[in-house]
Image (tube, helix red, strand yellow):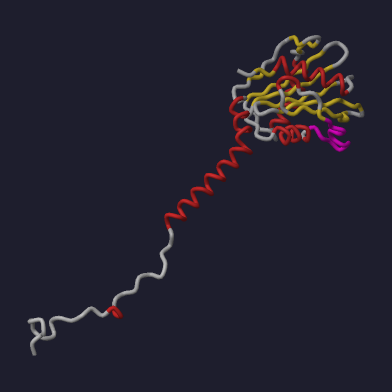
Amino acid sequence: MVDPDGGPAGLYYEDDDDDAPEAPASRVPLKRIAIITGSVAAAALLVSGIFYGPTVFRVLGQSDTEIKSPEKVGAFTLDKSDGAQQTSEYIRDAIASKVSLDDSVGLIYRDGTKDAILVAGTARIWKPEDTLKTAFDMLTDDKGGVRDTRDVDAGPLGGTVRCGTTKVDDSDLTVCGWADNGSLGVALFSNSPVADSAKSLLELRTAVEHRG
């Protein structure tokens, strides 16, 4: 048999559309998903920057904080005796066991009528309020720990500053402390009410904490 178009029979045939592979009904929109995913990631990064950006900025800005040990701070004089150093270092070690400090000091200042045991150190602190609470918790005992805590004036250095009272050997001591994104300090004052201790802490902090 000869093909009507001139070729051998059986060598030519018409395409059968029914036998052709069907195209997928739909394709996964990879490009669109990529765009959406990228947009979500960018939005999440933006939100994170809004909430955490200021904290990161403060932490980095205060990362060069230094702690010094001046011999005189107003009416206070640094006690360099062995007993004073042992007492202040004992408290420093207790606080440092819970709060990781890079460089720290334990100091005792006296002004004739009252004493101040000061522990101060540097660190990158992300949550100053929590860190100060942890430091206060290290001063707790079976008689109630630090009680009646309240926020007080932080002065030009900012951060969180609080004062309260604690009982040691049946005597009440005032406890004041500060925490910012670059340092922590806790002081125990004898024979000093909270209002006066808050002012003394501000004076001591200004003399001890230095930012580059």
User: In the picture shown, does residue 138 fall above or below 32?
Assistant: above
Q: Nearer the viewer, residue 1 or 49?
A: 1
Q: Nearer the viewer, residue 68 or 20?
A: 20
Q: Indicate left or right for 157 with 153 as reference.
A: left
Q: Is residue 147 magenta?
A: yes
All told, the count of numbered labels is 0
Q: Residue at x 59, y 22 (%)?
A: 64
Q: Nearer the viewer, residue 37 or 3?
A: 3
User: In the picture shown, does residue 192 fall above or below 139?
Assistant: above
- Toward which corner of the image does residue 51 lie, by quadrant? top right
Q: Indicate left or right for 38 with 22 as reference.
A: right
Q: Residue at x 72, y 19 (%)?
A: 156
Residue at the outermost front position: 4
Q: Is residue 92 magenta?
A: no
> Could you say where residue 57 lies in the image, as x and y percent from the top left?
60, 30
> Could you say where residue 164 lies in the image, as x and y percent from the top left?
85, 29
The magenta region covers 139-150
Q: Quadrant of the N terminus?
A: bottom left
Q: Quadrant of the C terminus?
A: top right
> Could you say where residue 110 lies in the image, as x and y percent from the top left?
81, 13
Q: Residue at x 77, y 15 (%)?
A: 203
Q: Nearer the viewer, residue 101 or 125?
A: 125
Q: Main secondary structure of the magenta part?
A: loop
Q: Indicate left or right for 37 with 54 as reference.
A: left
> Could you say where residue 94 lies in the image, as x and y percent from the top left?
73, 31
User: In the picture shown, does residue 202 fall above or below 18?
Assistant: above
Residue at the outermost right position: 170
- Toward which corner of the image does residue 11 lie, by quadrant? bottom left
